[in-house]
Image (spheres, grey):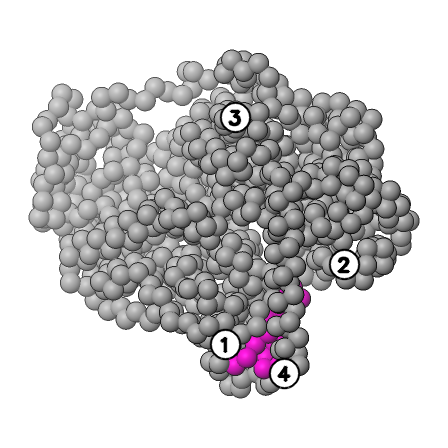
Amino acid sequence: MSDVTTAPEAGTIVLAAPLAGWSTPLDEVPDAVFASRMMGDGIAVDPTAGTLHAPCDGELVLVAPSRHAVTLRTAGGCQILMHVGIDTVNLKGEGFTLAAAQGARVRTGDVLLTFDLDLLARRTPSLLTPVIVTADSGFRIVRRVEGRELRVGDPLMDLAPERAAAASVAGALPAEATVQRATIGFEHGIHARPAALLAASLKSLAADVRLALRGREANARSTVALMALEARHGDEIEIRASGPDAALAVSALIAVLGAAAAAPGSGAARGSRIPSVAGTAPAAIAVASVSIGDAAPAPGDELTGVIASRGLAVGRAFHLRRPEIAVAEGGAGAAHETQAFDRARASVRARLERRAAGSGEAAAARAAGEIAAAHLELLEDPELLAAARVSIAQGKSAGFGWREAVRAAAAQLSTLTDPRLRERVDDLLDLETQVLLALTGAGPVAAAELPADAIVIARELLPSQLVSLDAARVAGLATAAGGATSHVSIIAAAMEIPALVALGPAVLSLRDGTELVLDAERGALEVAPPRPRAEAARATLRARRERLAAERAAAQRECRTADGTRIEVFANVGSAAEAEAAVRNGAEGCGLLRTEFLFLERNSPPDELEQTAAYQKIADSLGGRPLTIRTLDAGGDKPIAYLPQPPEENPALGLRGVRTSLANPPLLRTQLRAILGVRPLEQCRFLLPMITEAGEVTSVRGLLAEICAELALERPPALGVMIETPASAVLADRLVEVADFLSIGTNDLTQYTLAMDRGHPELAPRLDALHPAVLKLIETAARAAATRGRMVAVCGGLASEPLAAPILVGLGVHELSAVGAVIPQLKTALSRVTVADCRALAQAALAAADAAAVRALARRALGEGAGGTR
């Protein structure tokens, strides 16, 4: 039993208990919207009688059509929402009887409605009744009574006006409005929870937003006003927004409405980074559903999988299993379990913070640090915490509540179409294990004792498991499930450990000690191969190591062709760790910094200081070498949770790349200012993604000029554009008039030119950037650049192919920006040819029939041993 009290203030409102029952913290309400205080702060009452009374004098400004919720407004403008039970909107009014009509003026203690307590107990998840001071009221709670039995009229909460109420956004905003129509997708219309989700989506946006329906208008930031619209499922509403973030605000609302429409019956939109899990039972997780087969693969069998980290390994199977942690369902009381949960999370948080701060200069340590930072955000996810605390409040143990919350969220993520979001399941399960171990007092995941040359076998690996292994003893990784872009795959690549994922259940049947050849270049795991094959693989490994050592030594010199022509070989990076690894491999700079790593998997965009610090860290890692920073390339296959986009039938052809940035000027302005904060600034240059016309470049140039004037900078860094569509290649002669250089992104250029989705399982193998049609577009862009003396780079996947490097140089390319690990091979390949050789080869390639013919031609010209992957 507790009373939370502060000294009374002028203008205090005293709320009386509107129900007889037991007062309970809002955290215990089994609904994440209420428990996370999305609608506002308050108290819940577990009723013992079926009558709801007025907690103070005021006007009954809103009565829900289903009569399950009412809102009272005091003379001072404070709004109090009383929501009887959870999910009672589904009863559609059954069991409720109104005693006061909407618009009525009532006195403290007046009966507002009655309800059938037994009916609600049988047919709804909970009778807990939130009493909420709405977030837009301008009042805060200074005293509340929790954990005690209440009679109607007993003191419940004291409210005081906010000392500095936020000024209305509308008065400071321009009159120009963005107007768009949308359809209500919520099954029961805009009731309490949908209203909270819509209002929450507008937080931190500078815009005045109104919704209009049937001649009525509501402030979209006010949950009460939204509920008062009485918008029903299927209604078409008009959204009007004005101010700097008007377009972003409209997109945010449409995204929430669209998510609801995509999942009718949910009662809420899945707009948050971790889907809402309150009240969701744990489910089987798709990516972890692999089971061990009855028979192990026979000697000589070959299992095929997905390449996660390239390379070749020879070793013996070693099974690594996740720790099995027994969790009791029943708890020792909510207070005890909450304290244990908070202690365990604090322990895990401290360990993750140490790792995120960086524990060494190695690329693997840096990659692990960056992943730890992502785990820190998941550890604080409000949806997960709310769901876990609800279970604890219902008498479950902290471990059971945490596991239930994580498994439910993971099950939902595993059903999403975006593979990167599905692969975040492993991160969730990793956090589950870390917190459960902390609850048991066992500490972090213990490192396994590995034999030498171990090829580690697992269903999936946790990132924390991988970083705890002795890398000197790991020859390769082979997992039954998992994905090529998971965090484990990223760490494996940083550790230069060959890895195959999605090998299927058969790999789990391999016996420990079975000899294996893991070929992570053609995606095959060879089981107990014949002795000559195993010896040949070992000989190949020895030869590769010797050649790589020689190439790495040579790669520290600047790249020149056999006749002395300078070709710059840069690296594509996404972190400081990748930049350091690239420099060790001979990178002469960074030709593409993918800034998405700063924006993904978080609830809000990074501010200017955070961005500048991240860019500066990478610039420092390059040791003064050139740094090309691409502005945010969001949209399409890179959705961002806090940057809602309108529903798009084909996102690849929608609001993506520079279009997204131009549609969100504050986001673009912040990023440009952040880049201009890097020192020395001369090291940097800007790169704009997905440009299709000169007007997009001039728009960014104008904004850049404004910022430079604000910062008293005389001259901005060079501004380049990505050539990623046939349109930009064909119009390159116009783009070079407004851009300082061109950088060709062959991945998207190939996709759009050949009309093949690079994620299509049947077409992806045919998606080859050496197709003559793609090469013709590269030549077109290079010729246009040459007329204006502009530099031309290739930063797409084709730049990472040693086989393609001479062809690209022959087409007029001056710079290649590649995956760091292949830089030594690229420099070696170019050192063996003259520019004349390159031009002859390029002309022959342009005349070839198809990509296969180009590859055959290149192999003959450069030697049968020339390789490279697509």
Q: Which of marks 1 and 4 is nearer the N terminus?
A: 1
| Rendered position, 542 above or below 636 | below
Marks 1/3: CA–CA distance: 49 Å
Residues 300 and 660: in front is 300
Which residue is labeled 1 in the image?
Answer: 317
Q: Give the range drawn in magenta.
A: 514-530
Question: Which residue is tagged 2?
Answer: 866
What amino acid is labelled 3 in the image?
Pro
Identity of the amino acid at label 1? Ala
Q: What's the distance in space between the residues labelled 2 and 3, CA to CA?
A: 40 Å
Please tell me how crowded label 3 is: few (under 14), some (14-19), or many (20+) other residues with Cα within 10 Å.
few
Q: Mark 3 points at which residue?
A: 680
Measuring 62% from the left and 50% from the top, which residue is drawn there? 553
User: What is the C-alpha distance between the residues marked 2 and 4?
Assistant: 27 Å
User: Cβ–Cβ below 8 Å for labels 1 and 2?
Assistant: no
Task: Provide the secondary structure element on which disc 4 rests.
Answer: helix
Q: How many labels does the image show?
A: 4
> Can you tell which mark lies on residue 6?
none
> Which sits earlier in the primary sequence, circle 2 or circle 4?
4
Q: Earlier in the sequence, mark 2 or mark 3?
A: 3
Q: How far apart are marks 1 and 4 (CA)?
A: 16 Å
- Verify whether residue 524 appears in magenta: yes
**Element at label 2:** loop
Location of residue 334 by image quarter: bottom left
Residue 656, located in which quarter of the rendered image? top right
Residues at circles 1 and 3 in contact by the CB criterion of under 8 Å: no
Whether residue 337 is visible, yes or no, is: yes
Task: Check disc 1 and report its element: helix, strand or loop.
Answer: strand
Residue tagged by mark 4?
Answer: 531
Q: Where is residue 405 in the image (x, y as percent from the top left)?
A: 34, 58
